[in-house]
Each structure stands twice: as structure tokens, then as C-alpha cells.
Amino acid sequence: MWKIVKTKLNRLMVKSNQLVLVRHGESEFNLKNLFCGWHDAPLSAGGIEEARSVAAANLNRAKMTFDKVYCSKLCRSRETVEVILSEMKCSFLPIVSDWRLNERHYGNLTGINKRALANEYGEEMVQCWRRNYDGLPPAIDTSNIYYYQIANNPAFQEVPPTEFPLTESMRMCVDRVSPVWLEIKKDIQKGTRLLVVVHGTIARSLIKLIEDMTEEQIEKVNIPNCVPMIYDFNIKTGKLNGGLKYLGDLEYIEKMKKKVAAIGD
């Protein structure tokens, strides 16, 4: 116990602490190029491999260590955490699973192929739904085959009925994530080493809050699956020491960013 306390005191004396953000591995819906949102799609075989060979491998290579993990209530986030912690030999770490870190709800677009939507409504409309800060997909209704699966998911029992979304814009996601970010920031300033495994829009929401980006700036940010992203903070002030750093092969990262930005096939 004294060794753990001493280690934390040493980190506080250094006056800086790092936060690691990771987007979950490829899900079964990512693989099929479908809007996923609050549908609880599991990782694909490729997503499991990404969690192992991209996220965990780069974290191990950088000799990163953690005290605590944050993730969402969606299984693709939790499954990614499980693979990473297993590969890093630290499955004992406490995990905070918070519904407010769930992916953006894509409303009645849930389960629909992005390319098919682009063919019907045009690429500009689909990119507006995907990227515009206030782009709001049509609300999900009972005609959507995933409506009841989402509404009755026991993992979402903690969601207050008045806050259970039927659709969301990125602005709404930032508002939802903001209170969680304040909790995460408190942990950072206590010297707690954090791994946060979330979703594309939620990672972008956190990045906007952390860097105080404009709406136009965050619309252009693309988050590749399973690439660790590192922020360094001043423990005393809570301010950033420099900008976002990626762990991994830069050519691979740029390739994956372009893939995320595209509507796909």
C-alpha cells in the first residue's frame, strides 16, 4: 500500500499527468458500413485484432501504465477494454462504465448503410448528418428494427427516461459528455493515470472540450479505431502541456483517418 501511495506522490511531484484516449476496435456494424450509434454491436474479428495489435501493442511499446479505465455501456467499448487490459496484463484495474460516454445516437439512420443513404439522399446530406456540428438525423421510431433492442437494453437502465435520446447532434453529445469530462479531469489532477476507451463522436467531443476547439475545427477531426491518443496535463492547473500525440505508425494513422472521413462502400 505504501508503495502505491509513494508512486502517486512521486507523480504529483512531477506536476504532470497523461490521459490516453482510444476509440474502440472495428465493430460488426463498422465492418458493414452501417450507422451504429446506440445499437450494441460487438467487435468484429478485425476489431478484436485492432485492440490487440494496434492499441495494446502500441501502449505496451510505449511502456504506458494505468490506474483506472473509463468506457461506455456499449459492448464494443467494453470488449476493447478487455482485450487491451488482458494484453497489458492489468485486467484487475477498476473500470468506470458510464452511459454518458455512449456513442452518439444516430436516430432512424441506425442500421442503414452509409453508401446506400448517400445514393438516395446525396453525399452532402449524409456528411451533414455525420459531421455537421448541429446535423440532426431523423429521430428513431418503432419502424426501425433496432428501436426495441435499444430501448430495452438492460445496459441502459441507469439512463434517466428524460435523457434517453432518440437522436443526437454532435452539439448534444458535447453537452452530454461535459460533466463526465469534469470528473475525468479531477482524476487527472489527482495523478490518476487514465485510459478512456470510447467512440468516434465521443472522442471528438472530449477533444473539443480538452482543446477548446471551435465547431468548425472539430468537424474536421477524424478518429481512427484503436490508435492511442495522448494528452499531457499540468496537474496543478489542469492545463495542457502541448497538443495531442498519437502512438503508432504515422502512415497507418493517416490512412485510417482518411477511411473514417469517407462515406465508404
Image (cartoon, rainbow, N blue to C red):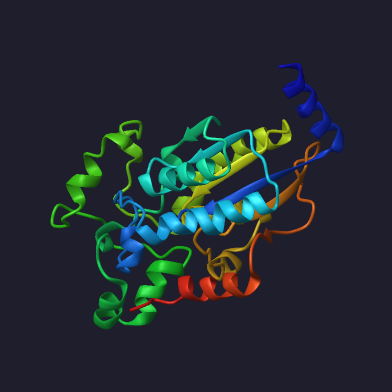
Q: From where the camera sits, is residue 112 visible?
A: yes
Q: Is residue 254 left or right of residue 147?
A: right
Depicted 19 relative to depicted 189: above or below: below
Quadrant hosting residue 69: top right
Q: Is residue 233 left or right of residue 262?
A: right
Quadrant hosting residue 245: bottom right
- Which residue is at the far top? 1
Depicted 68 relative to depicted 113: above or below: above
- Percent position (x, y) of residue 112? 25, 66
**Which is nearer the eye, 1 or 193?**
1
- Percent position (x, y) of residue 199? 46, 53
Depicted 225 relative to depicted 59: above or below: below
Q: From where the camera sits, is residue 176 visible?
A: no
Quadrant hosting residue 37: bottom left
- Percent position (x, y) of residue 148? 18, 46
Q: Quadrant of the C terminus?
A: bottom left
Instruction: Say which residue appears at 68% left-offset and 33% top-offset.
Output: 192
**Which is nearer the eye, 215 or 23?**
23
**Which is nearer the eye, 172 or 211?**
211
**Which is nearer the eye, 63 or 174?**
63
- Percent position (x, y) of residue 61? 67, 53
Depicted 143 relative to depicted 1: above or below: below
Instruction: Say which residue appears at 49% left-offset and 54% top-offset.
Output: 51
- Which residue is at the far right? 13
Instruction: Say which residue appears at 41% left-offset and 67% top-offset.
Output: 130
